[in-house]
Image: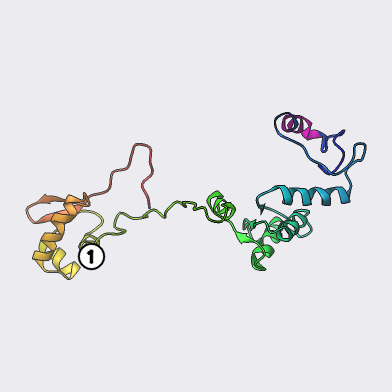
Amino acid sequence: MAGGLDGWYPRGNSRLLDQIAGECVVVTEIPPGIRPTRQGFLARNRLIAALSGGTLVVEAAARSGALNTASWSLRLGRPLMAVPGPINSALSESPHRLIRDHEAALVADANDAGALLTPVGEHVELPGVKAVRELDGLDPELAAVREAMPSRGDIDLDSLSVASGRSAAQCAAALIRLDMRGLVQQTGPQHWRIRRPRHPAGAPAGG
């Protein structure tokens, strides 16, 4: 707190502060009877940086008090992070400057922050990047045949051979393997078409 504990500030947060005081702890360096002052807010910022595992600046204007907290975080050796925002927003000015000047690490989501706050020696498992297309990771020969097929309608084996630059025998072998993977389907003798992947009910198809 930026003032004494005998008066909540801002008063509109009294219910929230009562709950925090009842379940956790409220801290200040200011004696009772002292209202919040500029020096009190600066002292509060130092306590915030000291009691936290790191500081994350989400939005802050050019002269925001969050910069004081960020400065204390750096002086205390705590991780300093910042979230980039719209370039035309005044509240993005400080996060962008911290990132630009290499004072803060760019954080895109909670996983990024968690990785930076993980103690040295411990390993944090970040989510992997999921394939955005069903052909990602597919054998190049299979992918070449599959991508040579029209997005709509079917294609005969000879036409597919010309379109893919593979022999008819190579295309036939690839089509069998693609069929086993559920990526194509046979529509008639020597005719094939793309099989669209099935998505769980309610799940959108990736684009």
User: Horizontally, is 205 left or right of 23 in the view?
Assistant: left
Front position in the image: 149 or 138: 138
What secondary structure predominates along the stretch shown in magenta? helix
Rendering coords of residue 193 (x, y %)? 18, 53
Badge 1 crowding class, 10 Å Cα cut-off, few under 14, some 14 to 19, many 20 or more, is some
Rendering coords of residue 58 (x, y %)? 66, 52
Rendering coords of residue 14 (x, y %)? 79, 31
Front position in the image: 156 or 196: 196
Q: Which residue lies at the image location 36% right of the left edge and 55% below the top edge?
A: 131
Mark 1, secondary structure of its residue: helix
Q: Which residue lies at the image location 72% right of the left edge and 29% below the top edge?
A: 19
* Callout 1 amino acid: Ala
Residue positioned most to the front: 121
User: Horizontally, is 125 left or right of 55 in the view?
Assistant: left
Residue positioned most to the left: 189
Residue 53 visible in the picture: yes
Q: Which residue lies at the image location 13% right of the left edge and 51% below the top edge?
A: 186
Front position in the image: 77 or 17: 77
User: Horizontally, is 127 left or right of 44 in the view?
Assistant: left
Above or below 21: residue 157: below
Image quadrant in which the N terminus is located:
top right
Residue 18 is covered by the magenta coloring? yes
Stretch in magenta: 12-20
Q: Which residue lies at the image location 52% right of the left edge and 53% below the top edge?
A: 122
- Quadrant for residue 24, please give it: top right
- Quadrant for residue 7, please give it: top right
Residue 154 visible in the picture: no
**Number of marks in the image?**
1
Rendering coords of residue 75 (x, y %)? 74, 60
Residue 196 is covered by the magenta coloring? no
Residue positioned most to the right: 33
Disc 1 marks which residue?
144
